[in-house]
């Protein structure tokens, strides 16, 4: 009787030990996969042109898929709204100029001022990565009929065009009001007597 009680007490402990070992193995495997995934992303970071060409290929594959199945227009509309939201973050400065308006202009107003590069609210790599991931998710959704909601797609297209026009007009008005451009390439830095082209440096953030 005592032996059976000892075996019954040892059983759950052994199962708990096996379960803990299994969870630890799964955690190590997930960590290894995540590190490999991050390593691949880090290798792709400097290849801007190739990344955007790859995104164009993904977008064309998705558009072809939607065209062939003649559906999933609501998924495409949601994808378009998401990309528009990302675009606004990509074109917007990291710090709202309205907050810094009391501190004076951020662009150089004299030869003694130093050029401040444009810092995006959404960096270029995150912008590309988010759009690519969104297209991949939308592409997978086209294989599930539950997401194929019947809608009149010209109305959705009209709504999106109107929303895009209004949003971009507001963004351009914001750029004109606070005198900034969402690009830093080709600009100059003022270093005293004369302006010289800004040279890229890996140490600059």
Image (tube, rainbow, N blue to C red):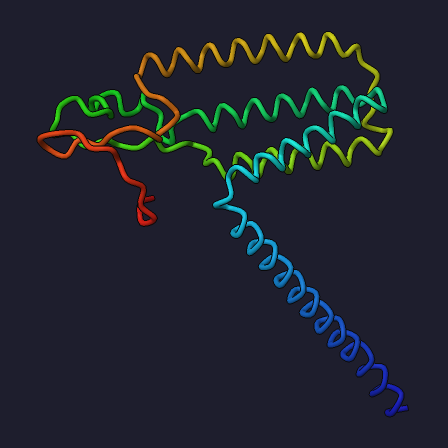
In which quadrant of the rendered view does residue 2 lie? Answer: bottom right
Residue 124 lies, with reference to residue 3, above or below; the image says above
Tell me where residue 26 appears, x and y as whole percent. 70, 65
Name the foreground residue: 87 vs 67. Answer: 67
The number of discs equals: 0
Q: Pinpoint residue 106: horizontal percent, then vertical percent.
A: 24, 25
> Picture quarter containing residue 39?
bottom right
Q: Is residue 176 left or right of residue 169?
A: left
Name above or below for residue 194 compared with residue 205: above
Q: Which image quarter is the C terminus in? A: top left
Against 60, residue 179 (above or below) is above
Describe residue 53's horizontal placement relative to residue 48 as left or right: right
Residue 198 vs residue 74, the one in the foreground: 198
Instruction: Identify which residue is drawn at 66% across, 25% down.
Output: 79
Looking at this view, is 152 or 201 the one in front?
Answer: 201
Residue shown at the point (56%, 40%) measured from the top left:
50
The residue closer to the viewer here, 202 or 182, is: 202
> x, y percentage for residue 57?
67, 33
Quadrant placement of the N terminus: bottom right
Identified at 74% across, 31% down, the residue is: 61
Relative to 17, residue 69 above or below: above
Lateral position of residue 120 relative to residue 7, left or right: left
Residue at 85% in and 86% down: 7
Q: Quadrant of residue 59?
A: top right
Residue 153 is left or right of residue 192, and the answer is: right
**What percent of the width, then of the height, locates residue 33?**
64, 59
């Amino acid at each position: 009787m005592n032996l059976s009680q000892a075996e019954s007490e040892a059983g759950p402990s052994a199962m708990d030990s096996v379960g803990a070992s299994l969870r630890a193995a799964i955690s190590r495997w997930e960590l290894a996969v995540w590190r490999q995934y991050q390593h691949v992303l880090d290798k792709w970071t400097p290849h801007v042109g190739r990344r955007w060409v790859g995104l164009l290929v993904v977008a064309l594959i998705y558009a072809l898929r939607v065209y062939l199945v003649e559906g999933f227009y609501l998924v495409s509309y949601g994808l378009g709204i998401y990309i528009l939201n990302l675009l606004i973050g990509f074109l917007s400065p990291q710090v709202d100029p309205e907050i810094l308006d009391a501190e004076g202009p951020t662009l150089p107003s004299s030869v003694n001022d130093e050029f401040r590069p444009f810092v995006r609210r959404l960096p270029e790599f995150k912008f590309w990565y988010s759009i690519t991931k969104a297209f991949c998710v939308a592409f997978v959704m086209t294989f599930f009929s539950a997401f194929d909601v019947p809608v009149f797609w010209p109305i959705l297209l009209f709504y999106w065009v109107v929303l895009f026009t209004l949003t971009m007009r507001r963004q351009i008005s914001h750029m004109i009001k606070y005198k900034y451009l969402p690009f830093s390439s080709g600009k100059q830095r003022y270093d005293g007597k004369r302006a010289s082209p800004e040279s890229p440096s890996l140490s600059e953030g």
